[in-house]
Image: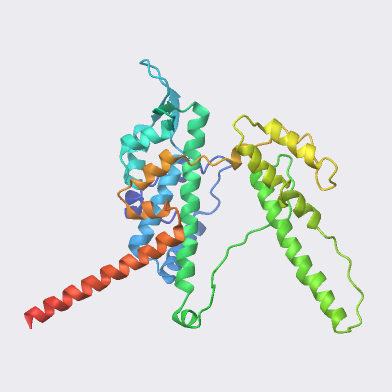
Amino acid sequence: MGASEEERKEFKLLAPEDYVYLKQHNFKIEDEEDLRHDFERLQQAMEMVGFLSATKKQIFSVLSAILYLGNVTYSDKTSGRDEGLDVGPPDVLATLSDLLKVKEELLVEALTKRKAVTVNDKLILPYSHSEAITARDSMAKSLYSALFDWIVLRINHALLNKRDMKESVPCLSIGVLDIFGFEDFETNSFEQFCINYANEQLQYYFNQHIFKLEQEEYQAEGITWHNIDYTDNVGCIHLISKKPTGLLYLLDEESNFPHATDITLLAKFKQQHQGNRYFVATPVMEPAFDFREKNTDHMRPDIVALLRSSERAFVRQLIGTDPVAMFRWGILRATIRGMAAFNLAGRRWATKS
């Protein structure tokens, strides 16, 4: 909504309802005019913090590719002796190849097969249907996450002015925080667990600075004060993150065991924390227990290698091992090129003179 006809063609945009990722949960467009206005404001905001037209096009190309990844489908091979999956549709693969500037045959291979190294050989193994879907979705999530981090990094750099740099300010940044209290649904996923943990940490910070430290300062200054009682949630935080038996550490431990399952993970949780008043292993928890699967890194080296083979420097930069280092190198490289162009122009002017 809001893109011009030229932008629709350049980024291969479809109607919103044609993207699988967008229409999974009660998809409905309420007010098209508001969405167009929001897109215009987005464009203006990007320009205000220094995003050039070429940079905006690169960002929108990656976002379009992420949406197209959701439209990739798999089916069992119907002919030949080869095991594995057929991937399509052909037009989606061709569009993805063009948006990410990667070779289509390499894209197909990364979405359907994985490479494994043994002592004596390298094996190419076909994905099962569920593994292929996981690899596809993890590629989309990783691209989106990398793009988000890059944009925040770029905004932070734009906000760091010369005065701050001269005064050696150690850190100046903009953060985004979006919370809506502690939520407990009928089915709680790993994402909700992480959100609730973040909320507990924020509540702990609030307790420390608004109640505990403030009241201690009143007492030290001899101010007459009746202490306010508050619920200390440090026990809940320890349950989740204290070494070595916090839930997050047990989760990482089980994620690294080749024969571990969700059942063994839940059993370990219960074994360590059955008597903890903050831990409740309800029946609702078990059928929806997806912590271990979602904690596993499915961004396989094959997909990383595919994206690093892109002809588009922006995509290669997003998948860099250290986004900050890659971003700084990009600035340095642009500076060096600018200086070289300036020197070349100076020499040409001197020759004409």
Residue positioned 65% across, 37% down in the render? 254
For this rendering, which residue is in front, 165 or 89? 165
Quadrant occupied by the C terminus? bottom left
The image shows residue 318, relative to residue 267, as above or below, that is below
Q: Is residue 272 above or below residue 177?
A: above
Between 95 and 29, the one lying in front of the other is: 95
Q: Residue at x 39, y 31 (%)?
A: 88
Residue 285 visible within the image: no
Q: Is residue 77 above or below residue 345?
A: above
131 and 237: which one is in front?
A: 237
The quarter holding residue 332 reads bottom left
Q: Position of residue 193 (x, y in %)?
A: 69, 47
The quarter holding residue 272 reads top right
Of all residues shown, which one is farthest toward the left?
352
Residue 82 at x, y = what percent? Answer: 38, 19
Question: Residue at 71% of width from left, 59% of height from top?
Answer: 201
Left or right of residue 67: residue 52: left
In the image, residue 134 sits, relative to residue 36, either above or below, namely above
**Percent x, y of residue 107:** 36, 37
Residue 327 in picture, x, y percent from top left: 41, 62
